[in-house]
Image: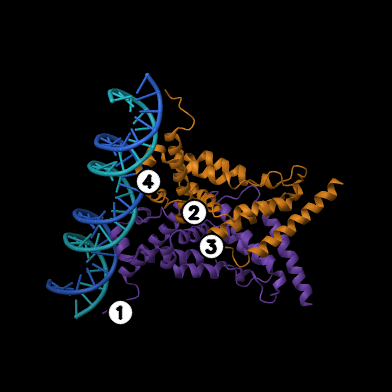
Chain colours: A purple, B orange, C cyan, D blue
Amino acid sequence: MKTQSPTNLNDARSRATRARLIGASIDSMIECGFSKTTGVEICRRAGVTRGALNHHFPVYSDLLIAALHQVYSTLQTEPDATSLESIVRSSYNNVIQPAFKVVIELWLASQNDPDIGTELASAISDSSSAFSPKSLRRSDINEPATDAIYYTLFELLIAIGLGRATSGGKASAHEHMVFETMLNLAQQQDSRGVKNNE
Amino acid sequence: MKTQSPTNLNDARSRATRARLIGASIDSMIECGFSKTTGVEICRRAGVTRGALNHHFPVYSDLLIAALHQVYSTLQTEPDATSLESIVRSSYNNVIQPAFKVVIELWLASQNDPDIGTELASAISDSSSAFSPKSLRRSDINEPATDAIYYTLFELLIAIGLGRATSGGKASAHEHMVFETMLNLAQQQDSRGVKNNE
DNA sequence: TTGCATACATACATGCATGTATGTATTGTT
DNA sequence: AACAATACATACATGCATGTATGTATGCAA
């Protein structure tokens, strides 16, 4: 029978091995990039053989999809943010995470190899929902004239993330200046929004 | 003797082959990315065999360095720009070039593989001189308080370049809004600079 | 025209990643 | 206890990129 006790030993072992493979995939993509993240490298980091990887993920791209879903789940913008400023702060905390480099790597990899785009299509759409400018847009304000501010802040977040990704995860000397500028823009927009709603 | 007529046939042939190899390298890096740009792929595009590549570039990284130098030479910001706005316009025309993707690819590749960073160190320093925020800073204005504007514009240029690189070279639906915002920021800064100089 | 250097092309050996098939030990079921 | 399924490890074959060695044709100089 398929039905087994919930504290199945094999099941727990499988989950642990899967988690280690997924974690090793993320670490490898952060440190080695997308193209140098190979099955051999993942198994080396996870401390298992390729037999284990093939057993749990017969289709290699499924492992990458699982890893990407885990990355995106940790990079979700706070959904209950009320002001644009708070959304900017929350998103900033996302893009400065080392895992954000994986998102950028995937963008470029799927552009360089269309097959990757199709194989990881589900993960990519997940990405857009987590980082789309829509998450930056307050539902109570939607004037076309102010879209530029939202998109500009969105682009600046991406740029900061790229800067971190290309600097070993460390902030550049001027990152804080850019962040302060972003906060100013967000606060101005927030105050305009309040005035418009009054 | 080494001294030959300036219109040496062999010399012209060599230059032509080198140019084709360098051009094929750039094209491959734009279309296939850094990691998938291989000696085989370059030779296939250039229409020569790997023997020719090895003859002209016994050290493979020398070919990449030559290709990157050519990329950077075509992405130089206009040195005689007078206003910040004109510099932004000029830099914008650079980052929307397909070749700018090569710059981003190199940033990530050298981060993923430190060996690449050391091998292509000369090309990378070339990059910093071509895209450093210093090129955005007017020599007549250098107030620390206004640095944030320059760095913010710099980051936005990078973000636009990344957006192009991850969208097949085509502009996103909101790119023009961001560009207009950048021009506004630049014009405001320009007018403040004039007032300060009066 | 003879000899040498240049500019390639071809061929072989090596390393690495992947796909796949099979062996094996542990776990779970009856 | 016997059988079967799970969770691996090991081994083999293949493809691709690279390094290198050698063959060869053309240009150039004496």
x and y percent of residue C30 in the render?
A: 19, 80
Relative to B151, is D5 on the left or the right? left
Q: Which disc is residue A3 wearing?
A: 1
* Nearer to us: label 4 or label 2: 4
Task: Establish whether labels 2 and 1 are both on one chain.
Answer: no
Task: Establish whether labels 4 and 2 are both on one chain.
Answer: yes
How far apart in space, not on screen, are marks 4 and 2 (Cα)? Answer: 20 Å
* Nearer to us: label 3 or label 4: 4
Q: Quadrant of residue B128?
A: top right
Residue linked to disc 3:
B167
x and y percent of residue A196 in the render?
A: 77, 75
* Nearer to us: label 3 or label 1: 3
Res B58 seen here: no
Residue linked to disc 2:
B30
Q: Residue at x 28, y 78 (%)?
A: A2
x and y percent of residue A148 in the render?
A: 69, 66
Q: Quadrant of the N terminus of chain B?
A: top left
Q: Residues within 10 Å of mark 2 (few under 14, many from 20)?
A: many
- Secondary structure under tag 2 reads helix
Q: Are marks 1 and 4 in contact (CB under 8 Å)?
A: no
- Relative to residue A197, is residue D11 depicted above or below? above
- Secondary structure under tag 1 reads loop
* Nearer to us: label 2 or label 1: 2
Q: Residues within 10 Å of mark 4 (few under 14, many from 20)?
A: some
**Disc 2: host chain:** B
Q: Amino acid at mark 1?
A: Thr
Q: Which disc is residue B48 wearing?
A: 4
